[in-house]
Every structure is written in C-alpha cells, then in structure tokens.
Amino acid sequence: MRESLAQIGTLIEKEFRLEWRQRYALNGMLLYIVGAVFICYLSFNAKRGELSPIVWNTLFWLIQLFTAINAIAKTFVQERAGRQLYYHTLASPQQIIVAKIVYNTGLMLALALLGYSVYAFVLGSPVEDHWLYVGSLLLGAIGFAASLTLVAGIAAKAENAATLMAILSFPVILPLLLLLLNVSKNAMDGLDRSVSFDELRTILAIDAIVLALSYLLFPFLWKS
C-alpha cells in the first residue's frame, strides 16, 4: 500500500513537472479565464447592474466548463505511444488513472478558485453563502476531472481526439453541470443549506460512480 501511494505521488509529480515545462498551456488557460471574464464585463455592462444573478451564475459555470475541457483534453494526447508503453512497465493502470485524476482535480480546483476570484472582483459577487458556493466548486472540480480524464483516455485512442473529446464529454458533464447550477444558485440566494442536500448527495454519488468506473475500466482501455 505504501509503495503504491509512493508511485502515485511520483506520477503526480511527473504531471506537475510536465505541466510546468509546458507553461504555454497553463498560461493559455489563465489568459482564457481572464479574457472570458473581461468579455462578459464589456458585453453585459456590469457597471450599470444589467447582469442578473442567474446570468452571473450561468456564465461563470460555462467559463469553468470550457476551462475544464481545455485543461484536461491534453491529458493523454500529449503523451506518445512509446511513453505510455514505458509507463506501463513502471506502474499499474490504476495508479496512472488515480494520479491523473488527482492532479487534474487539483488543477481544476486552482483554476476554479482563481476564476471565481477574478470573476467576483470584476463583475461583483451576488453570492450570499460563500462556503456552499466554494463547496460546489470543489465537487465540480472532482466531477469534471474524473469524467473528462476518462473521456480523454478514450478519445486518445481515436484519430480525431479533439472532436471525440467534445462529443463524449457533453452528455457526461451536462447532468453534473445542471446540479452544480442548482446548488450554486441556492448559495447565491442565501437559502438554508438543507435545501441543497439532495443535489449535493446526487453530485457526490455521480462523482463516486465516475471515480469507480475510471478505476475499474481504465485498465482495459490502457491495455488496448
């Protein structure tokens, strides 16, 4: 168990080093977030208060969705077949998928918190319950990372990975996104947290199912 955790830690460190070595991709994601927020500011004339809370919330999650797709789509595509074969000799498929999901979850959470900070600073924040809203960001980061990492692994086996990634990710992410919109809207309205318990349990169930499927199915995908 300890050796397995050590290998997962090494794989996570590898992902971080690879991301840091290709800083243009990270800079591109940061530029996308800032640019999208600035466009929303100009388009909806936020100074005059023309941006309603519902639109504010919807735009934020749309930015997070496309940020997640852009950040995770390259998870397997950037690695050549020879490198993947080398990884196969060093670690088990379960360790590889767990490491990638953990790293992508951390990356998504960092981008989500940064995006939320920039978005709230530029457009103002109508959120009443900030802790519940941040909790929805955490659950969303886990769900996006697990779902899109598995989809990226499937798409990497095809010739047109980018197109397949977009097609497969939409039906997987849409139910999760709708639930996150409901929870975050409750947080914006300042409703009692018990109102969001059903949605939160459903989101946790979806995250758990996706994580379990990724752990069980990825070895078959990896061997192919």
Image: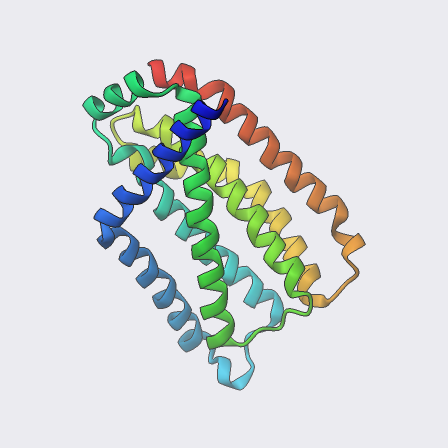
In the displayed structure, would residue 6 be above or below residue 112?
A: above
Q: Is residue 131 left or right of residue 141?
A: right
Q: Quadrant of the C terminus?
A: top left
Residue at horizontal 61 percent and vertical 65 percent from the top = 54
Find residue 14 and report its image quarter.
Answer: top left
As drawn, which residue projects farthest toward the bottom?
48
Q: Is residue 150 visible?
A: no
User: How many numbered discs sit on the rendered protein?
Assistant: 0
In the rendering, at what x and y percent does residue 61 appear? Answer: 52, 56
- Residue closer to the observer: 131 or 39: 131
In the rendering, at what x and y percent does residue 211 appear? Answer: 54, 30
- Residue closer to the observer: 152 or 204: 204
Find residue 186 and report its image quarter.
Answer: bottom right
Residue at horizontal 26 percent and vertical 42 percent from the top = 18
Find residue 181 and report its image quarter.
Answer: bottom right
Residue at horizontal 48 percent and vertical 25 percent from the top = 2
Residue at horizontal 69 percent and vertical 46 percent from the top = 200
Q: Is residue 143 left or right of residue 169?
A: right
In the rendering, at what x and y percent does residue 145 appear? Answer: 46, 40
Q: How is the image coloured?
A: rainbow
Q: Is residue 207 visible?
A: yes
In the displayed structure, would residue 65 be above or below residue 78?
A: below
In the rendering, at what x and y percent does residue 124 appear? Answer: 54, 76
In the displayed structure, would residue 155 be above or below residue 143?
A: above
